[in-house]
Amino acid sequence: MHILVFPSFYPSAVRPLTGIFFKEQAEALHQAGHQVGVLVAPRIRESLHYIQTHRRLPDLQTAILETDTDLPVYRMHWGWFLRIFPNICAWLTTPAGYRAFARYCDEQGKPDIIHAHNIFYSGYMASRIRRRFNIPVVLTEHSSSFVRRLIFLPGQHRIVRQTLREVDAAAAVGASLQNILNAYLPERPVGLLPNIARTDFFIPSESPLPEPFTFALVTTILLPLKGAAVLLRAFATAFRGGHERLLVVGEGGEQVALQQMAQQLGIAAQVEFRGRLSRQGVRDIFYESRVVVSASYVETFGITLIEAMACGKPVIATRSGGPDNWITPETGLLVPTGDVPALAAALQDIRTHYERYSSAAVRQYCIDNFSQSAVVRQIETTYAAAIENFQRTQQRTAG
C-alpha cells in the first residue's frame, strides 16, 4: 500500500525532535513493507530557517522535497498564518495543500490513502484533498488543546466538525481526547490509535539497577501543566534528607523557578536538572533511574512513559487523560492530578515495594501494546476500514 503521511509538524533541522513520533510511525509503516511518503504542513520557523540557510525564499507555490531523509519528505512553506485566525488559516492552507499534493503525486505517484495527524491543519487540508482527488483519508488527533479547552476561537469548532465529517476514519491517541472528539459528531465515532514505542531502541540496560534509588521526570519544556512543581513537593514530602534522587529533564519554562523551589524545599542536593536531551540522552536517563514519573495535569498520551516501559521501568502517572487507560497494576501506579500527598504516597509505595514489578513483564506489556509491529497492525486495520468506508461513500454518490 502507498501511504502518504500528512502531519501538522515533523522533525526538521531547526526542531529535530518536534513530531518525532510521526517520523517513527512513518518509518514503522515503511519497515512493514508499505511505500510511504511524507507531506508536512507549513510552519513558520521552518520557513524562516530555510530563508536563513539558503538566502532566498522557498518555492511558495508547492512543497520542497528534502534530500537528507530516508523517506521522501515534502515540506510546505505556504499557507501558515496567525493561529488566532483559524478561518484565514483554513482558507490559505486549502489551495496550498492542493498544489503540494499534486507535486507529490507527480513525483511519487498517487497514494492509496492519506494518514493525517491533527486537524489543525493537516487534517483539514487532507479532508479537502479527499474531496478533490478522490482518495481515502485517516485522521489521528494528538493535540492537548482539546483537553485543555483551548479550542474556542471563531471557526475552530466548524473546522473540527467539518474535518471529522469528511474523513473516512478518525482516531485519537488517548481516551480523554477520544471522548471530546466524539461529542462533536456522535454519529461518526472516533477510535483509538496509540503512539509507537521504539522497542528496538529503548531496550533494558545490561547494567545492575542504579543506586541510589532514582526517579526521573522527562519532558521537553518545563511548563506548569507538566506538574514538575507538584512532583518536587511530593518528592520532598516523601524523601527530604534521604538517599533517593530525582532527575528532571527539560528546559526553559519553569526551570529556574523549579531550581529555586528545590532549594527552598531542602532537596536541592537530591534533585538534578539535566536540561533538554537527545533521544539517546533520554534513554540514558531511563538507565540511571528506577522509576519514571509523569505529574502532568494534561497528557493526551504520554510517550515518555511507554519509552521508559520499553526499557523495563515501572512508571507513576497522574490521571491526566492519556495514561489512565493503559497503566496497569503490573506496570505502575496512577494518582489524581495535582495531589501532592497522593503522589508522595505513590513514590514511597513504589520505593518500598519495587520488587513487585518485573522489568521483563513491564517491557513485554509495552511490546504487546505499543511496539512498532503492534501499532502498525492497528493502523493497517484502520486503513482497511477507511478504504471500505470510502468505497461505500463513492458508491452512494454514484448511485
Image (cartoon, rainbow, N blue to C red):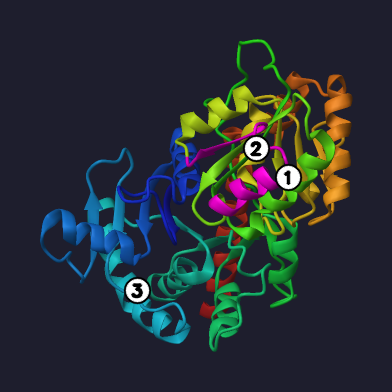
Cβ–Cβ under 8 Å for marks 1 and 2: yes
- Calculate the distance from the C-alpha at mark 3 to the C-alpha at mark 1: 45 Å
Q: What is the number of callouts on the image?
A: 3
> Callout 3 environment at 10 Å: few (<14), some (14 to 19), or many (20+)?
some
**Above or below, 160 relative to 386:** below
- Residue sitting at 25 percent across and 41 percent down? 68
Cβ–Cβ under 8 Å for marks 2 and 3: no
| Disc with the residue nearer the chain's start (3 vs 1) | 3
- Residue sitting at 73 percent across and 23 percent down? 213
Residue 398 point in image, percent of width and height = 51, 78
- Residue underneath mark 1: 265
Mark 2: which amino acid?
Answer: Ala
Numbered circle sitting on residue 268? 2
> Callout 1 environment at 10 Å: few (<14), some (14 to 19), or many (20+)?
some
- Residue underneath mark 3: 80
Corner quadrant of residue 47: bottom left
**Secondary structure found at label 2:** loop
Q: Which residues are magenta?
A: 256-276
Is residue 318 highlighted in magenta? no
- Residue sitting at 70 percent across and 55 percent down? 174
